[in-house]
Amino acid sequence: MQSLRDRWRAFKYRLQNDFFYSNKSKEELLEKTSKNVDFVDDWTAFVHHYNEEKMKKQSAQNAKKQKETLSLSCLW
């Protein structure tokens, strides 16, 4: 099950990098669905979920923690 979980997380990560970090508006994201997502409803739900303020804050917090972790690991 861990392998499946890791693949799912990697898939979501690729979708975020390919579409969300290109500074597109929500409308632009909804117009261009990923060829890797089978259903338009799934894509719409994905776009809405990752455009929520709660997710944006969590993403920024995770990025900050990741940087701190990487900088601390360089000290060892």
Image (cartoon, rainbow, N blue to C red):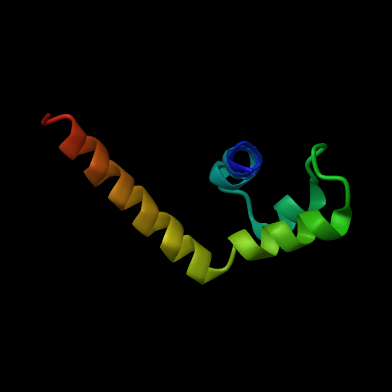
Which residue in the rendered view is the most extreme toward the right? Answer: 39
Is 27 in front, or is 70? Answer: 70
Q: Quadrant of the N terminus?
A: top right
Q: Quadrant of the C terminus?
A: top left
The residue sitting at 16% across, 39% down in the picture is 72
Against 72, residue 25 (above or below) is below
The residue sitting at 64% across, 64% down in the picture is 49
Against 41, residue 17 (above or below) is above
Instruction: Tell me residue 74's x, y (percent).
Output: 17, 29
The residue sitting at 20% across, 34% down in the picture is 73
Query: How many numbered tags mark residues here?
Result: 0
The residue sitting at 29% across, 51% down in the picture is 65
Instruction: Tell me residue 39's x, y (percent).
Output: 88, 52
Residue 54 relative to residue 72: left or right: right
Which residue in the rendered view is the most extreme toward the left? Answer: 75
Q: Based on the displayed image, in which of its 4 quarters is residue 21 positioned?
A: top right
Is 25 in front, or is 5? Answer: 5
Is 63 in front, or is 75? Answer: 75
Residue 32 relative to residue 65: left or right: right
Instruction: Tell me residue 63's x, y (percent).
Output: 36, 49
